[in-house]
Amino acid sequence: MAAIDVRKDFPILKRKVHEKKLIYLDSAATSQKPIQVINTITDFYKNYNTNIHRALHTLSDEATTLYETARKKIASFINANPEEIIFTKNATEGLNLLAFTFGKDRVKENDIILVTEMEHHSNLVPWQQLAKQQKAKLSFIPVTAEGKLDLETAENLLKQKPKLFAFTHVSNVLGTINPAKQLIELAKKYNVPTILDASQSVPHMPVDVRDLDCDFLVFSGHKMLGPTGIGVLYGKKQHLQNMNPFLTGGDMIKEVSYTETSWNDLPWKFEAGTPPIAEVIGLGAAVDYLQKIGMKSIQDHEQELTAYALEQLQKIKQVKIYGSQQEQIGVIAFNLADIHAHDLATVVDEEGIAIRSGHHCAQPLVEKLGVPATARMSFYIYTTKKDIDKAIKAIKKAKKVFKL
Ligand SMILES: Cc1ncc(COP(=O)(O)O)c(C=O)c1O
């Protein structure tokens, strides 16, 4: 794919920051939005806006069709059935939903919950809290010095039969692509249900839930060209059927009396209240856009950019790069000598370049790297080698500013 061809679709890339053309290298935090997604959302509000699943009037029927059609698109994008797709606010809410329902019913005193040392806070804090509530124990698959999961220890920990295993497909700090299929197979050997945090994989590479055979998977719409306020939880039908609802109220019910309620069918049992209608439809448009380019082309493009950026960064003697620099996609964490990453990001920003700095919502992992913070560049379909060249130039300028 050619990033140049898609850039025209992203109006924000035309703006300036500090009188320089914006270069956006923070797509792991959130992606920019193509005009096709923006137009789909405004078109909804201009022409179809009403509540769904409720009224019999034409507008409601049309809006419901748009919403449920988007669910079908999103389901097919990850090779799931529409009834296995639950709309949430974001990946974080999907993980909390699982902790408060599936997790709470399963995990009891002295049980083990297995995660890894490279989780985003969203896939750590809910399990940490559940472990505290249930007097259970949290175990961690270690991250090796190369920024990979220690697979030998993973098997030993799975042998201890944790009640569930939640892990990230791609690290939002190191960009490591974890061998998800292998880990899920291993978990199945010990009958351990798996929850995959696909927040950094679904936007950037082909993901097939049937092929992976995970029990659950979550991701956020805003990292994959869609709007904020929409996330996706995939769950195998038999799990979702057996689970209690997370939130209760309108739309998720079948029959209500003053004393009793029966639950709606899947997937609506988990979608209480008015859902983020425009956001779901917007995410459907984002999926159309991604599919037109092809997820394999997107992965190839980002892998090529990552290899190029790593090569250029390595040429700067004072740069330390974290992670394996293999099986890595779209994300690079680094520091410039002992300059604080916030100071580096500020100098780089003066050139109109947005990079992230801090602990990237994975504070324990960054502490394990032995630093308070790192800078992070992350890429997407609209990123070009020229963007990376400009970032490298800005880092070289920072070297001068900090007299390195
Ligand atoms: C790996 C990973 N998991 C979970 C999340 C949480 O996503 P959200 O804030 O959209 O819920 C992120 C966001 O950066 C992430 O990178």
Image (tube, helix red, strand yellow):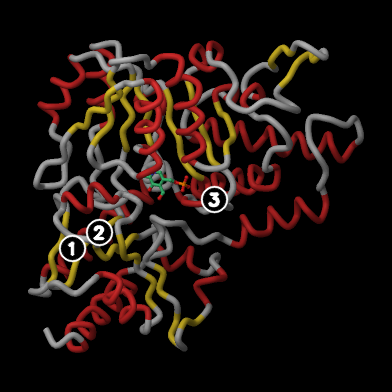
For this orientation, the residue located farthest to the right is 57
Percent of width and height locating residue 71: 62, 33
Please tell me which of labels 2 and 1 falls first in the chain.
1
Q: Are marks 2 and 1 in contact (CB under 8 Å)?
A: yes
Which residue appears at 35% of the width and 51% of the height? 361
Q: Nearer the viewer, residue 7 or 82?
A: 82
Q: Nearer the viewer, residue 33 or 126?
A: 126
Circle nearer the viewer, 2 or 3: 2
State the mark number for residue 332: 2
Above/below status of 30 relative to 318: above
Disc 3 is placed on an element classified as helix
Horizontal relation, residue 392 to residue 217: left or right: left
Q: Quadrant of residue 99?
A: top left
Above/below status of 353 relative to 41: below
Label 2, label 3: how far apart the Cα atoms are: 25 Å
Q: Are marks 2 and 3 in contact (CB under 8 Å)?
A: no
Residue that carries the numbered disc 1 in the rendered image = 310
Going by the numbered disc 1, the residue's amino acid type is Leu
Percent of width and height locating residue 335: 19, 67
Label 3, label 1: how far apart the Cα atoms are: 28 Å
Q: Quadrant of residue 207?
A: top left
Residue that carries the numbered disc 3 in the rendered image = 289
Going by the numbered disc 2, the residue's amino acid type is Ile
State the mark number for residue 344: none
Going by the numbered disc 3, the residue's amino acid type is Tyr
Horizontal relation, residue 32 to residue 214: left or right: right
Percent of width and height locating residue 33: 55, 60
Above/below status of 300 relative to 341: above
Please tell me which of labels 2 and 3 falls first in the chain.
3
Which residue appears at 23% of the width and 86% of the height? 397
